[in-house]
Amino acid sequence: MNNWTTTCDDSNGGLVISSRIRLARNLAEVPFPHKLNEEKSKEVIKLVENAFYTPSSNKDTFKTNYLWEETDNEKRNYLEKHLISKNLIDNSHKSAFILDNQQTISIMINEEDHIRIQCITAGLNLEEVYNVSDKIDDLLEGNLKYAFDEKLGYLTACPTNIGTGLRASVMLHLPALSLNNQMNGFLNALSQVGMTVRGLYGEGSKAIGNIYQISNQVTLGRSEEEILSNLKAVVVQVTNEEKASRENLMKKFKYEVEDKIYRALGILKSAVILNVNECFKLLSDVRLGVEMGIIKNISKATLNNLLVSTQPATIQDGNEKILSAIEMNLNRAKIVKEKLNIDKVQ
């Protein structure tokens, strides 16, 4: 799998930034994480490690990160890279995650459930990430006894995950639909077909930079194949609507759209101070220009990387002193200028 922060898949015009699969699993006859104390939680971590790090596999390409040993900034950095969830951070005193060298596979332990297997890759590649997560699931299930009911399927802490325990999601860039005020209509329509739309960092987050996550709401009574097929069909429909909306904008407001895009690029290449919201808004405008072929010397992979490298914890990472708000904004502007100018030279 390809790390979405360093690569880009141009299928669907590059509108789909990443695809992600999460499988929720729990150990049989063990209370859910919110009922476990630290000692019992760490016993669960050890059980999962023993099941995953078999004598012949995974020890060279994966590493366990114990959150109680990590700094607050390191935890936020993992979150910004979509490697862990906020719930896992909330349980830092008794949680951990196993991460691969490519940072595409993350096995969260003692989040809402005992195990959350997460795989993420660039572009619309739901089958690929599901196949990888399924293999990891088979490995763990071969060495652990899962909480499973013949009628209900996999038992989870949250009733909405019962069944397959599968959450499939895609991250998309939808500026034209947002600009035309069409997103509210899509939100209502998607909820009718068992889908939900969230912001950049999932549940409870806002869609900054016109970036949205679409995922399945229902896991019970549907097979994994159905969930993936339904989500993929919805994504294709949404991306087609976004493309049509872009074409309509260009027909009616060609010069205004181009002006908006080039102004955004000019600000990003010359700004001395950038706060995170302004940065994401401008990056969205530039991404629109790149996706539509108006800007040709900036790669989508660079723009993907900037979604992470301009975030507060990532900027703070490597700085010995705590950065003030103005220092954070100065560093953000510097990072953006450097990456955009490097792309131009290449």
Image (cartoon, rainbow, N blue to C red):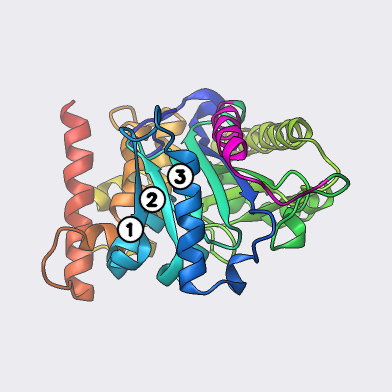
Specify few, some or many for label 1: CA neighbours under 10 Å numbering under 14, 14-19, or 20 or more.
Answer: many
Most foreground residue, 56 or 122: 56
Tell me residue 285's x, y (percent). 42, 47
The quarter of the rendered structure image containing the N terminus is top left
- Of labels 1 and 3, the one closer to you: 3
- Asked which secondary structure carries label 1, the reply is helix
Specify few, some or many for label 2: CA neighbours under 10 Å numbering under 14, 14-19, or 20 or more.
Answer: some
Q: Earlier in the sequence, mark 3 or mark 2?
A: 3
Q: Gap between marks 2 and 1, in whole Å?
A: 6 Å
Q: Residue at x 54, y 64 (%)?
A: 205
In the rendered structure, the answer to whether residue 105 lies left or right of residue 59 reads right
Q: As displayed, is residue 337 above or below residue 243?
A: below
Q: As displayed, is residue 225 above or below residue 328?
A: above
In the rendered structure, the answer to whether residue 274 lies left or right of residue 245 reads left
- Asked which secondary structure carries label 2, the reply is loop
Q: Circles 2 and 1: CB distance less than 8 Å?
A: yes
Specify few, some or many for label 3: CA neighbours under 10 Å numbering under 14, 14-19, or 20 or more.
Answer: some
Q: Earlier in the sequence, mark 1 or mark 3?
A: 3
Q: Which mark is residue 50?
A: 3
The residue where tag 2 is placed is: 81
Q: Gap between marks 1 and 3, in whole Å?
A: 27 Å
**Span colored in magenta:** 128-149
The quarter of the rendered structure image containing the C terminus is top left
Q: Residue at x 22, y 32 (%)?
A: 343
The residue where tag 1 is placed is: 77
Tell me residue 21's x, y (percent). 58, 41
Q: Amino acid at mark 1?
A: Asn
